[in-house]
Image (cartoon, rainbow, N blue to C red):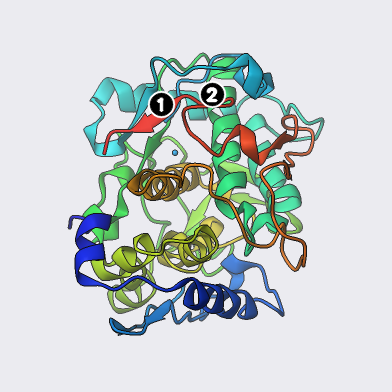
Amino acid sequence: MATASFENVAQTRPLLSEEEQDAYAEEEKSKVSDYIPVYRRLWFVVALCCIAVVGAVVVTAGTIIYVRPSTVHKSASSSQSCQNPSVRREWRTLSTDEKLAYLDAVVCLTKTPSVIGRNQTVFEDFPWTHNNEGMSAHYAAPFLAWHRYFLHVYEAKLRDVCHYSGSLVFFDWQLNVHDLPAAPIWDPITGFGGDGNATGVRTVNTASCVTDGPFANLQVQYYADEAKPHCLSRGFQAPDDMEKYYSARISEDAIAIIMALPQYNAFNLGMENGPHLAMPHGVLGDFFSDTAPNDPVFFLHHAQLDRLWWKWQHAKPGRRREYNGASSMHSKEAASLQDQLEMGTLAPKIAVEEIIDTQSGILCYEYAY
């Protein structure tokens, strides 16, 4: 199903006024005043948005850059121009060789010792960092920005540590809005393996071990805040629940409403409360946790979110550097492009300004569509 364009939505749906956007953003923030980590809310339901003239749309709640080896450490001044941006492509458009090269690089990360000094692998450095450094970015202005940098660091590790020469890829879940289990990303040969073993022992969050594909029985060390060694686990929802907790969040109308929000703060929160939750609620298992990067599909999912932000940024003049809202979760301070994105010891902290535009600062990429 094609995503409605911003222009088409703008012609048929009146945009929120600035006052209405502020009210919408405040409403979204109020839903997490007593914060429980987002992936733990199996029955969490979000009223996505009510737009005055449009009527109410209720949604149940539930990336590709050619990274040079030193780009994580470059400043904006050392990357003045982006003459030849790499193109991030959707998984199913890759050739078999390209898919296998990407998968081999991820497997390589699962066999390479940690770069942050822990008794784990480079692959596991990412769920660790997401849980320990990234959670304060949720439900605040840095949500999209922090994950954009996180993806950049991930690709840098694929390239620098495992000699991957391609780009990150995204999974366009709208192409599988009603049939997530049929998506090609779950292929056991040219994908990430499928659902957990339905007859196997339950491991985390009612899920069980993935037993096919390149990550079959992959051992990971943490689940949320717990040191809990276990196998990579998934537990796809039953069809009715999949429609309710996955499909509704990424329907054409749901995405179109978010894409039509003209203010960054409302757009950012709409993305987090809506499509961001779709995959965790559909896949469950490790994906449904603050250590969601235990599942390598996490990075394709967040690349898709980053793609929608990129599209939103390019839909209107002046949006590429728009950034507002709370500086961090529960903070009353206003966000700024000079705010720092923290990655712990995984990568240097940088200002939001360095990654706000995908073709300036340390970044140089675009999306295929």
**Amino acid tagged 2:** Leu
Q: Give how far across and how far down residue 41 sits, in percent.
A: 57, 75
| Outermost right residue | 117
The C terminus sits in image quarter: top left
Compare marks 2 and 1 and give the one earlier in the sequence. 1
The answer to whether one can see residue 178 in this image is: no
Residue at image mark 2 = 158
Q: Give how far across and how far down residue 283 sits, in percent.
A: 43, 61
Q: CA distance from mark 2 to mark 1?
A: 9 Å
Residue 5 position by quadrant:
bottom left
- Please report the residue visible at 70 percent of the width from the left and 37 percent of the height from the top: 351
Give the structural element (helix, strand or loop) at label 2: helix
Front-lying residue, 104 or 338: 338
**Amino acid tagged 1:** Tyr
**From what the image shows, is residue 245 above or below residue 169?**
below
**From what the image shows, is residue 286 above or below residue 187?**
below
- Please report the residue visible at 29 percent of the width from the left and 42 percent of the height from the top: 187
Give the structural element (helix, strand or loop) at label 1: helix
- Please report the residue visible at 58 percent of the width from the left and 35 percent of the height from the top: 355
Question: Which mark is drawn over residue 129?
Answer: none
Residue 261 position by quadrant:
bottom left
The answer to whether one can see residue 193 in this image is: yes
Q: Give how far across and how far down residue 215 sits, in percent.
A: 47, 39
Verify CB contact (< 8 Å) between mark 2 and mark 1. yes
Question: Which mark is drawn over residue 102?
Answer: 1
- Please report the residue visible at 26 percent of the width from the left and 70 percent of the height from the top: 253
